[in-house]
Image (spheres, grey):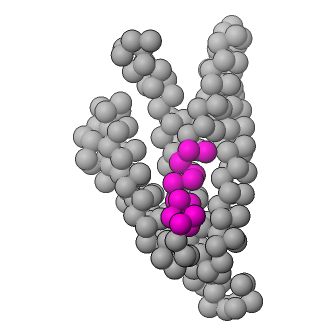
Amino acid sequence: MNHHQFHHKIEKSIREIVFGLEDSLVTSLGTVTGVAVGTQNTFAILLSGVVVIFTSVMSMSAGSYLSSKATEQANGFLFYKQKWFSHSFRAAWVMGLFYLFGGFIPLIPYFFLSPQKAIFPAILLTAFALFFIGFWSGHYTKRQRVRSGIEMLCISLGAALIGSIIGQIAHLIFGNYLI
């Protein structure tokens, strides 16, 4: 496969790649940060992270398949029966693969550090990944790369902050009952 063909395949899947990576990073970071703040229990943090990743991989893949199929059918592409199946199937696989990859990034520090010490590196690693995704996708979307990276970083970390806030509230309300 030459550079032009590779570039074309990326362009055809850019929605699933960016959506899968961004959503998995935000969901995983929000979940593990919330559980870390709320429980300080490494097992609970890793278990919740892995459960949310695999559940979301299946959900997002199914959603990508069904929405791609519905969109193509609604647009009158029924005569492309073999094409719409392969496009919908490809969309599901791309979404799932990139969701799986992105979801583990926020978990990495929790494998090596105590929950209290892993929170900041998890946020930092996720922030770097989000900026990079925005920067990288700027090339394919013909947008200014740094602006695209900053936009991805700010919007996504704002969403991930909710998990941390919920974890803090739960810890205040339930205290040591969560441990």
Q: Quadrant of residue 51?
A: bottom right
Residue 105 within the magenta-colored segment of the rendering: yes
Residue 115 within the magenta-colored segment of the rendering: no
Q: Residue at x 63, y 86 (%)?
A: 171
Task: Give the percent coordinates (x, y) of residue 26.
Answer: 52, 57
Regarding residue 67, the answer to whether it shows in the image is: no
Task: Give the percent coordinates (x, y) of residue 86.
Answer: 66, 17
Q: Which residues are magenta?
A: 100-112
| Image vertical order of residue 69 relative to residue 19, above or below | above
35 vs 108, left or right, is right
In this view, which residue lies farthest toward the top?
Answer: 79
| Image vertical order of residue 131 relative to residue 48, above or below | above
Regarding residue 110, the answer to whether it shows in the image is: yes
| Image vertical order of residue 26 relative to residue 98, above or below | below
Front residue of this view, candidates 36 and 80: 36
Front residue of this view, candidates 22 and 114: 114
Q: Residue at x 61, y 29 (%)?
A: 91
Q: Residue at x 60, y 37 (%)?
A: 97
